[in-house]
Image (tube, rainbow, N blue to C red):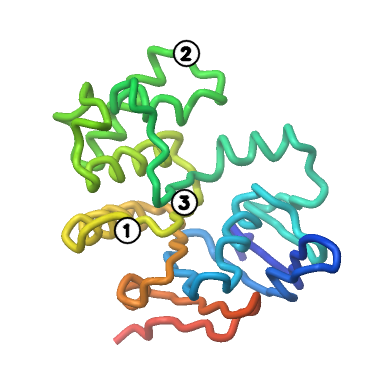
Amino acid sequence: MSTPIVQLRGVTRSYGSPPTVALNGVDLTIEEGEMLAIVGPSGSGKSTMLNIIGSLDRASAGSTEIAGNDVMRMSDNELSALRAFTIGFVFQQFHLSDGVTALDNVATGLLYTGMPPRERRRRAAVALERVGLGDRLHHHPRQLSGGERQRVAIARAVVGEPKLLLADEPTGSLDTKSGAGVMQILGELHDAGTTVVVITHDQGVATGMPRRVHISDGEIVADEREVAA
């Protein structure tokens, strides 16, 4: 039996004193190749869960395993390597550099892999082609629509071919048509074998996903899966 790509057991995350509990005893297993939404309102704990799954933060209690790695036992350098080679991130606000082209924005996704610059740019071009922006390689972000900028961000997230893609409100800044296009790309990446986790408050986005994990007040309150016909 394969090792889950994400395994949270009794994960609690609290902040401050007296403590504010953002996650409370969460158990979650995500198998490699799954596509799911973690859905809940603002303040529900879903962003904290994203940070835990993405190894951007550590749990206060419980265990976190990502791609078979015990996050609690890893050094900061080891966590950086895990993120560089295993996890891709897509954020609502794109986080693109205005002063450089789409090609070079995507190439920065390989900056910490030790890959030579020429090879980074070659792979960036392939990733942009993959998201339908082969004719926008040398455009700057200000020359692109919101949907195109989000596709650049997705290309940057997947240029290193990560096993796990985390998308935080990927349609939140987009119109309906552009948002649908982004979700189609994420679906295609899933079909190609990438594990895709979408964090969203949008029930419309969540409804179209094969699995929906609902979180409220730091706890998972429902875990729904589509039943094959």
Residue 190 lies left or right of residue 74; in this view the side is: left
Indicate the quadrant containing the N terminus: top left, top right, bottom left or bottom right. Answer: bottom right
Select label 3 or label 1 by which is in front. Answer: 1
| Quarter of the view holding residue 76 | top right
Q: Which residue is denoted by mark 3 in the rendering?
A: 165
Residue 4 seen by the camera:
no
Alpha carbon separation for disc pair 2 and 1:
33 Å
Q: Which residue is mark 2?
A: 116
Of the residues under marks 2 and 3, which one precedes in the sequence?
2
The amino acid beneath tag 2 is Pro
> Where's residue 110, x and y in %?
48, 27
Residue at disc 3, secondary structure:
strand
Residue type at mark 3 is Leu
Three-letter amino acid code at disc 1? Thr
| Whole-number angstrom distance, CA of label 3 to CA of label 1 | 15 Å
Residue beneath the point at 34% across and 52% down? 189
Q: Earlier in the sequence, mark 3 or mark 1?
A: 3
Residue that appears at 63% across and 40% down: 82
Where residue 35 sits in the image (x, y, percent)?
42, 65
Distance from Cα at disc 2 to Cα at disc 3 = 24 Å
Question: Within 10 angstroms of label 1, few (less than 14), some, or many (20 or more) residues?
Answer: many
Q: Are marks 2 and 3 in contact (CB under 8 Å)?
A: no
| Residue at (18, 29) in percent of width and height | 136
Mark sitting earlier along the chain (2/1): 2
On-image quarter of the C terminus? bottom left
> Which corner quadrant of the image does residue 157 belong to?
top left
Foreground residue among 68 and 208: 208
